[in-house]
Image (spheres, helix red, strand yellow):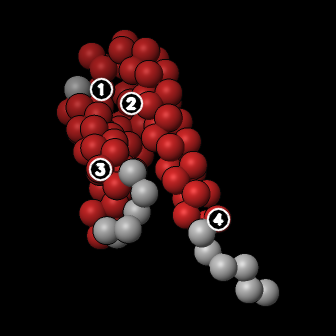
Amino acid sequence: MRSILLLALWIGIGRLIRGITQTLAAASDSTMPARGWQIFLGIVTLIGGIVLIDSPFASVAVLTLVGGIWLVAVGAVEIVTAIRIRGRARQLPRTL
């Protein structure tokens, strides 16, 4: 049981840190592509981390399902961000 508790706390702390850094990074850079989605994703990650830390045993049962859905959401946001960055990079002059 201690290993399940440790796993839930470890993942919760990781999500908490990722949520904080992602939200702050998106909020501080007004030119970031998909900024609203990045802030939204950071806040949801932060909330997920808090839930995992607050109720580790109850949340471990749902962690696999939510983790899978979460990875799909993160992947979609990162794909959109990459496409927008690529579009903006094409507009830059090529001076080397």
* CA distance for labels 2 and 4: 43 Å
- Which residue is the site of mark 1? 56
User: SS of the residue at dot 4?
Assistant: helix
* CA distance for labels 1 and 2: 5 Å
Q: What residue type is labelled 3?
A: Gly
Mark 4 crowdedness (10 Å alpha carbons): few <14, some 14-19, many ≥20: few
Q: Which is in the foreground here, disc 3 or disc 2?
A: 3
Give the mark nearer the N terminus: 1 vs 4.
1
Residue 42 at least partly seen: no
The image position of residue 53, as x and y in percent, is 27, 36
Disc marking residue 3: none
Q: Which amino acid does label 4 sit on?
A: Arg
Q: What residue type is labelled 1?
A: Pro
* CA distance for labels 1 and 4: 46 Å
Disc marking residue 8: 2
Give the mark nearer the N terminus: 1 vs 3.
3
Instruction: Name the quadrant of the C terminus.
Output: bottom right
Give the mark nearer the N terminus: 3 vs 2.
2
Is 92 rendered above or below residue 27?
below
The image position of residue 10, as x and y in percent, is 42, 40
Q: Is residue 63 left or right of residue 23?
A: right
Disc marking residue 90: 4
Q: Residue furthest right?
A: 96
Residues at discs 1 and 4 in contact (Cβ within 8 Å): no
